[in-house]
Image (cartoon, helix red, strand yellow):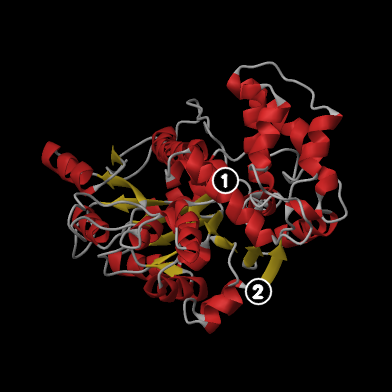
Amino acid sequence: MSAATPVNNPEEPFVEAFGGWQERSILIVDDEPGMRSFLQRTLVGRCSRVETVESVEAANVLLDQHHFDLIILDNSLPGKSGVDWLQEIRELGLHNDVVLITAFADLETAIRALRAGAADFLLKPFRVNQILSAIGRCFDRAHLRRENFILRRELDTHVDLAGVDGLIGASAALQPIREAIKRLATVPSTVLITGESGTGKEIAARAMHNLSNRSANHFVPVNCGAVAPEIIESELFGHVKGAFSGAASSREGLFFYAQGGTLFLDEVAELPLAMQVKLLRVLEEKRIRPVGAEREIPVDVRVIAATNRNVEEAVQEGRFRQDLYYRLNVVQLHMPPLRERTEDIPALAEYFVRQLAQQLGVAAKKPDSALFASLASYSWPGNVRELRNLIERWLILGNISDVTAANTTPGTTTNSDVTLEAVEKQHILKILAEVDGNKTEAGRRLGISRKTLERKCAEWGV
């Protein structure tokens, strides 16, 4: 048996811990035909895509064309060692997991491999279960890394879904939305979701993802208006070590974490113009370039965007690129405001009571007709998100009058001639006064971003 020949030991079973290998792709780089053939036979029934090449030059061609979840890399290659090539691709911004295999290992090579970013290191000859275990560890770590990242973002955003599509209520305004979500879930097209703040745009985007064939992978949301313009490119595409001051190490971007899944760009109209150009290129070519990298990386990500602004007006004013608008607006889904579906308020209120009572550790009270009457008479500038915040205050204060007083101020009128904009301004200024001008806290209570709140205050001269 040669040093490069693997040992097939069927008596040592292997268990795929997380499963889902059928969604994974692997690139094998080895100059020995027997090893390439063996690894391909071993993996082709387990993974969705297995490619084999005999040189780093051929590997570079495939990496430019496709995304691979894992690379199995021989260290002894003609012209260039596997470790040297691994260092090169890391410097170019490629973060693929790599298992290095070699027949001539020493401590120095192992240390260099790990420092270069190899996820695992195997000495030939190896058993079948050893290579499968190494691959499984890589997939498990990648799964957990993405899972932890997504869970941290979930805790930050506090998005809760109810039912399959997350939409609560049976109003006529919701029926076409539900039907559209089901249809859009079956296609890969880019979708632009419009509507006022707090109408459930992210919930609709999540529903499209959960009902699609991408649901096995992650839904990654990002609020474009909440990320500083100078770091938004790194946030989306990642960066390589030394790309800018403070970049002490390479970092994957949100497109990386959304690989195979869905990236939700909320408040997309807040993107700087320079970033709009780069996003358009990514949407058209399905490739990203991490900040400071010399190489583009293919990605398989569905993009769903959302905005509460009038994008056509922004295009006319030169604040949003027309070509990006057309590229995002393949299909548009408009979320109705709560004032157009007031019949859903009882169902929403009862849902929020159940949800928030458990989170707050208080008794779940049943809203009565007096509270529903008060809720139905309000215009809801903050929409469903504002309703949720009001129910939270009701559960804490326990007094309907204390809560409904938040909807009016002394001296205000309920005259039907009062415009929606006036009601919105009145309510926002009242919340700002309650929090002593803290725009971050006011935005949280109102269900809008700080940037949106600052824009409104600037318009009002506040």
From the image, state whether disc 2 or disc 1 is nearer to you: 1
Which is more toward the observer, 153 or 308?
308
Asked if 355 appears above or below 55 in the picture, the reply is above
Label 1 sits on residue? 446
- Residue 224 can be seen, yes or no: no
Which is more toward the observer, 461 or 166?
461
> Where is residue 350, by image quadrant?
top right
- Residue 73: x and y in percent read 31, 52
| Crowdedness near tag 1: few (<14), some (14–19) or many (≥20) residues, C-alpha within 10 Å | many
> Where is residue 241, by image quadrant?
bottom left
Q: CA distance from mark 2 to mark 1?
A: 30 Å
Q: Is residue 319 left or right of residue 108?
A: right
Q: Is residue 161 left or right of residue 137?
A: right
| Crowdedness near tag 2: few (<14), some (14–19) or many (≥20) residues, C-alpha within 10 Å | few
Could you tell me the amino acid type at mark 2?
Val
Label 2 sits on residue? 330
**Residue at 57%, 46% in the rendered image:** 447
Residue at the extreme left:
108
Q: How many marks?
A: 2
- Residue 188: x and y in percent read 65, 64
Q: Secondary structure at mark 1?
A: helix
- Residue 402: x and y in percent read 66, 29
- Residue 270 can be seen, yes or no: yes
**Residue at 42%, 43% in the rendered image:** 438
**Residue at 21%, 49% in the rendered image:** 116
Could you tell me the amino acid type at mark 1?
Leu
> Where is residue 360, by image quadrant?
top right
- Residue 39: x and y in percent read 44, 49
Q: Secondary structure at mark 2?
A: loop
Residue 307 numbered mark, or none: none
Instruction: Tell which circle, 2 or 1, labels the residue nearer the N-terminal end.
Output: 2
Tags 2 and 1 in contact by the CB under 8 Å rule?
A: no
